[in-house]
Image (tube, helix red, strand yellow):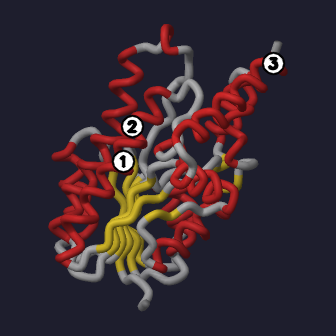
Amino acid sequence: MSAPATVLITGAASGIGHALAHEYASTATTLLLLDVHPPERTAAELSGRCTVRIAGADVRDAKAVAAAIELVAEGRPIDRVLHCAGVLAPTAPAREVDPADVQRTIDINLVGSFNVVHGALPHLRAGAHLALVASLGGLIAGYRYLAYSSSKFGVVGLAESLRMELAPEGIRVQVICPGEVATPLIDEELASGDAVQRAVKLLSGKPITAEVAAAGIRRGVEKGRFMVIPTAQARWLWRFSRVAPTPLRLASTDRAVRDALRRAS
């Protein structure tokens, strides 16, 4: 497969999006980088490696997203879309969850994904890849991740639906489901979260760096896999969840929660 010429990356100011910008800068001719504010630091770091165009847009605003993509694309086709922009929701027991946090999480993670897709589609041709970052938490629900898992399960469903619709046009839709990736937000969450949440979260393995995640994501995207899960332990958990009978799968997670509760007490 030939190297993509033009790559659009959202959430490019930090985390996985920032790491993917560095990862693709070695082969792409042009990087189109979006974030809620123009990712100037990322662009400065990539100066001289390739052409970089940046813009700012809140993914919750469909018109702003479409305008930002139009601005950076300048009417040219886009070969890869890697939608990384997203947010972690505050974790809390169900009785204490703020409905406003649920709405914000779904608006950014799920509705925002659709808005990016809708804004990018006019620029995609046969041979393009459209990859949405979900999460392992969008395949296997997380403990006290009500808003986050709900939003990321939605992203996986969105990708599956798009895959069927766009395949006849030669546009390859993919969904990226990393396990734990070491970002400042995750580090803070692991340090401050309750013991049960932390124990269940680490079932997918120790957090990997954003750079390791980006390298694995790029390999999976360029190989054309629909489901891209960049670590072996996370892939094992996903496969187990797919093949295990539902009672066995639920019993295994219940046991993990019970064990963590016992240790915490």
Q: Residue at x 15, y 67 (%)?
A: 122
Residue 103 is labelled as none
Residue under circle 2? 151
**Residue 195 left/right relative to 5:** right
x, y (%) of residue 120?
Answer: 23, 62
- Tag nearer the camera, 1 or 3: 3
Image quarter where the N terminus lies is bottom left
Residue 262 is labelled as 3
259 is higher (above) or lower (below) than 26: above
Image quarter where the C terminus lies is top right
Label 1: element kind: helix
x, y (%) of residue 135?
Answer: 50, 48
C-alpha gap between disc 2 and disc 3: 30 Å
Residue type at mark 1: give it.
Val
Q: Badge 2: how crowded within 10 Å, few (<14), some, or many (20+)?
A: many
Q: Residue at x 68, y 47 (%)?
A: 204
Marks 1 and 2: CB-CB under 8 Å?
yes
Label 2: element kind: helix
